[in-house]
Amino acid sequence: MEELINYLLQFGQLNESQCALIQLKAHRKKIKKGTYFSEAGKVARNIGYVTDGVFRICYYSKTGESFTRYFVYENRFVADINSFIDELPSAEYIEAVTDCEILVFSKKDFTELSLTIPGWSDIFSKITSYVMENKMRASSNMLVQDAQTRYLHFLEHYPGLTNRIPQLMLASYLGITASSLSRIRKTIV
Amino acid sequence: MEELINYLLQFGQLNESQCALIQLKAHRKKIKKGTYFSEAGKVARNIGYVTDGVFRICYYSKTGESFTRYFVYENRFVADINSFIDELPSAEYIEAVTDCEILVFSKKDFTELSLTIPGWSDIFSKITSYVMENKMRASSNMLVQDAQTRYLHFLEHYPGLTNRIPQLMLASYLGITASSLSRIRKTIV
DNA sequence: ATTGTCAATTGACAATTGCGAAATATCATT
DNA sequence: AATGATATTTCGCAATTGTCAATTGACAAT
């Protein structure tokens, strides 16, 4: 809970009573591995702050194959932000890759905080643009690197995450097949 | 100028006097082909709305090779938004691929509009998250498609743009070499 | 017309990665 | 411990793409 506050304070100012109010609105929730926090086609009713576990944001091809856009883990917000803010249908699925624990804010409470706390919206637009910019840069960088470079970069940037996610999901994030990833791992280790 | 207002109105509400104020703050500026609107390492002092021409957002490798992250053309905003908002050094270059004309807002005028027009900030955070989400989805999609599919998708999504940009830049956006792009074009046409 | 410059194409070859199938490994359940 | 389900590794081969070098094309300056 403290971590949530510290995270928010990186992006703007909040006094003690505002922090207390935020903590009142945040509710703990567990999400079982393999289930979805949010689904494509449905409006995202909640935004979550991950306190434990790993999610992946993914979509499916016509043939049912899944592709991982990115992972979200401890001390980051997880949500389809455009769906949540404008109440539009989500474009993607948010799947719990491990058993997860999050602090959820409902749309109603989130809106209430926007009205009560000046700067709340600003904090979130900063978080959103900062995080998205990084995600975009990451996948744009990957496009011009070979598979091994992408894998090494992942190891370096997300140490420990490799052991928490299935290789097939990592492969689909890296834009390669599970076989390829397996070959690469062999040459590295 | 009308197009700017229409664009903004897609993301929020503005009354007539607010629109007039915005138009007062927007200044026409020409940017010559091959020059930079914004440079890596420098703080972005302006945000631009493209009325004519094509920009590319790019970066350079140690060896001087350039990589194109994405293109921005008519009726879209162009800026390193995180640099502009938080006055941090830019991460990338914004280069005029053709001769360009833009409507610029200085940081000072932009801030003034934020204070004068309630909702101005909201409009921009919506534009930012909407646009970035799309950029991110685009490059994430590209990662799992082969080069020809990426090229066809580009043709379909940005009709006419191919003829306005050098193939080398398009290739670096698609994440392939100029040779590869040339071969692909040959098989298509 | 000629030259120079830069962009785009082409070709030969090498390296990377995908594909499909089979073999192992891992893990949960009984 | 045995079973079954799923994940991962491995293999051979095919397809894609990169690299490097040479050629061609377009266009401006002389």
Image: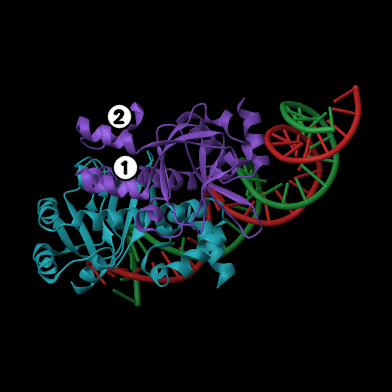
Chain colours: A cyan, B purple, C red, D green
* Residue B49: % across, % down: 40, 37
Give above or below for A87 relative to C21. Answer: above
> Residue B78 appears in which quarter of the rendering?
top left
> Residue sitting at 57 percent across and 30 percent down?
B164
Give the secondary structure at mark 2.
helix
Whether residue A36 appears in this view of the structure is no
Check whether the beta carbons of the residues at disc 2 and disc 1 lie within 8 A of each other: no
Q: Amino acid at mark 2?
A: Asn
Residue drawn 57% across the image and 49% down it: B67
Q: Is residue D8 left or right of residue A71?
A: right
Q: Quadrant of the C terminus of chain A?
A: bottom right
Q: Which residue is mark 2?
A: B6
- Left or right of B172? Residue B142 is left
In the displayed structure, A4 sits above or below B62; it is below
Task: Give the distance between the C-alpha atoms of the residues marked 2 and 1, in whole angstroms.
Answer: 13 Å
* Residue at which label 1 appears: B127
Chain identity of mark 1: B
Marks 2, 1: nearer the viewer: 2
Check the image and report above or below for A181 versus B34: below
Mark 2 belongs to chain? B
Crowd band around label 2 with a 10 angstrom C-alpha radius: few (<14), some (14–19), many (20+): few
The kind of residue on which mark 1 rests is: Ile
Name the side, left or right, on which A38 lies relative to A106.
right
Rendered image quadrant of residue B1: top left
Which residue of the protein is positioned furthest toward the front in this rendering? B24
User: Are marks 2 and 1 in one subunit?
Assistant: yes
